[in-house]
Image (tube, grey):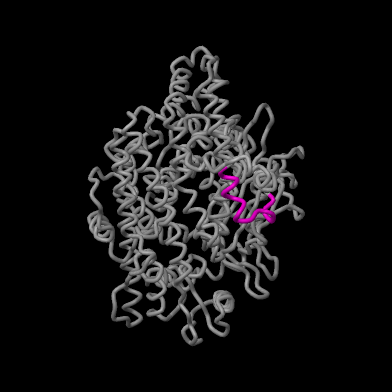
Amino acid sequence: MKNLLLLITALCLLASCKPAADKKAADNPLVAEFTAPFGVPPFEQIKPHHYMPAFKLGMEEQLKEVDAIANSKKEPTFANTIIALDESGELLSKVSRVFFSLAEANTSDSLQQIQMEISPLLSAHGDAIDLNPKLFERIKSVYENQGKFNLKPDEVYILENIYKGLVRNGANLDPEKKEQLKKLNEELSVLTVQFDQNVLAETNGFKLVIDNKEDLAGLPESVISAAAEAAKAAGLEGKWVFGPTRPSMTPFLQYAENRDLRKKLYDGYLSRGNNPNDKNNNDILAKIISLRTIRAQLLGYSSHSAIVLEPRMAKTPENVLTLLDKIWAAAIPAAVKDRDEMQQIISREGGKFNLEPGDWLYYAEKLRKEKYDLDENELRPYFKVENVRDGAFDVANKLYGITFTEITDIPKPHAEAMAYEVKEADGSHIGILYMDLFPRPSKQQGAWCGAYREHCFKQGREITPVVTMVGNFTRPTGNTPALISLDEALTHFHEFGHALEGLFAENRLSTTFIAWDFVELPSQIMEHWATEPEVLKSYARHYQTGEPIPDALIEKMKKSSYFNQGFTSTEFLAACYLDIAFHSRTDTTRLNIGAFEKEYLTGKGLIPEIYPRYRSTYFIHITGGYDSGYYSYEWAAVLDNDAFEAFKEKGLFDKATAKSLRDNILSKDGTMDPMQMFINFRGRQPDITPLMKNRGFLD
């Protein structure tokens, strides 16, 4: 519940919200109506000192609104209780969306300090609502008497999830246990922020500085140029800098001939949050896991996973493990086969060492070249980031008829961000899409999609979405545009899929309940179009000649599509297992994080040449909302591979199939049962076979 459970502040601040602050509030751009084009936030006017007063006022307003609902003398109805609650906290929602979006994509010391200060207050505010006994009694009354209100199916779904969610969050606890829960929630809110900020600091703090040009042997010129620019930005002009972020690290690990430097960079990546300094995350994560278990048991559940998974498609940790085990059983043998073939290359080249984790990508490239005559550097010239963007836009246009028009005279969250108005085929407005694609020290690692405003109706008035898509793709260098890897191109299509879901949403209430293991279906299905030959020919054009990617190169891509799937699946599944292992514990004692990680993954049969994609001390997914949920990508992979088969059967751009996907899934997500949405689209329950075939695990 986005207003009720996510956008939260603290009762203790209310005493400081005095009438004397009204004048300051009136001058606060966060509090004032957003009058910029399309009602987007006035980013250039918002300063750090504006946030806390806006948060204070927003929570004060919401608590007054909630108090009025809870103490109403009128008989509880869906309208005067559920809709009224949904419409509460409008200012708090507005401020929270701006602040947390910028704290992820363009943070600063000031924003990080505010984040540490506001997080426990937000937690307390959420508890003040979730644990309000009078409010719960009214919601319970509506829930138990829902037959009286002639509710639409989406309203029934929302009502049931609100009620059950409040129960899962402690509404039925006695007063003493409610106080215990509040303290646990507050402590967890601070620890998770601290964990994430430590990872960002460690990521920014490690640099592999190269001052001998010979140590760049094997690297493509574009990678060398990017490293030179990174060095210049760091005040090290004349040298080359590589960091532990994917766009910088991955090509170095793939192509640098200097094995010692590859190991040094990879070790810097792996050790984030695990160094002997004040950014060490071991104790923090141990506390988080222990407190989550204590919290779950206070609420009547055996483990954190048990409470988290109950409203999701998987339902139980056992169901998650059943899926992971099926894929793991096929992935490990494939990874072992690749490892042995790479070890043979090392031996043929006279190497007197065994393959290690930091060697994998380097020798995988050699193996790809040997088996398929394909070097990833052959592909980059065809994947200029602007062409990839236009390719995604073109796919959306062919599927849904929508258009994207760049807007320049509009406030932007960062100078590098681009803004687009999205319209239906008939020219009617859908929403605004921001794209912020390049890495910088102020941005968290990875790629994600969020919203400065989500679709809903307020008092009968439609609110259109403002979506933001954020990435960390390879930067342009000098006169060379941003030439991204195939993996980055897939990530671009992936996040664009999330953006489409946000733009197409038709929910009438701002409160929605999206099952976390369904949420990746809209994004992952978009990845399939990125490598279809027909689509590649339309957008993958050489950045210098404009010529489309040649058929011979597409054929090589097709033949090598199963290549390294053992590694890719294994490193990902290892992180999924680790997440579930942490959160399925019923023992509340503090873990030794490093020892637990090693012992558990060794017991699962993870080969020593592969580390999990995210090791524990920098696994920000499990502190940022994917706790007991990292498996969701694999769960959704079953769905997206099966769903894309519908387009393979009917036609890549079949209008009827596209309309069904939009109507049954993209526009409905969060407002009805996810399995029913899938069945409405596919005509049956999902089948794992397409996933296994597409990874080369089945003939």
Marks counted in the figure total 0
Front one among 246 and 546: 246
For this view, does 209 lie left or right of residue 176? right
Instruction: State the image quarter where residue 661 is shown.
Output: top right
Quick check: 690 left or right of 550? left
Q: Residue at x 56, y 29 (%)?
A: 65
In x, y percent, where is residue 517? 43, 41
Tell me what residue is drawn at x 41 percent, y 69 percent. 361
Which of the 4 image quadrants contains residue 423? top right
Q: Camera-side residue: 235 or 119?
A: 119
Please provide percent x and percent y for residue 156. 50, 22
Q: Viewer-proximal residue, 551 or 494?
A: 494
Q: Is residue 567 visible?
A: no
Q: Decide: is 613 above or below 315.
A: below
For this view, does 686 lie left or right of residue 16? left
Looking at the image, residue 194 lies above or below residue 141: below
Extreme residue in the top direction = 148
Task: Specify the segment rendered in magenta.
Answer: 42-56
Q: Residue at x 49, y 40 (%)?
A: 6
Q: Is residue 620 above or below residue 136?
A: below
Residue 594 appearing in the image:
yes
Q: Residue at x 63, y 44 (%)?
A: 21
Residue 492 lies, in percent from the top left, at 57, 55
Q: Main secondary structure of the magenta part?
A: helix
Looking at the image, residue 552 lies above or below residue 263: above
Whether residue 258 is in magenta: the answer is: no
- On the image, the x and y values in percent for residue 347 come to 31, 78
In front of the other: 79 or 456: 79
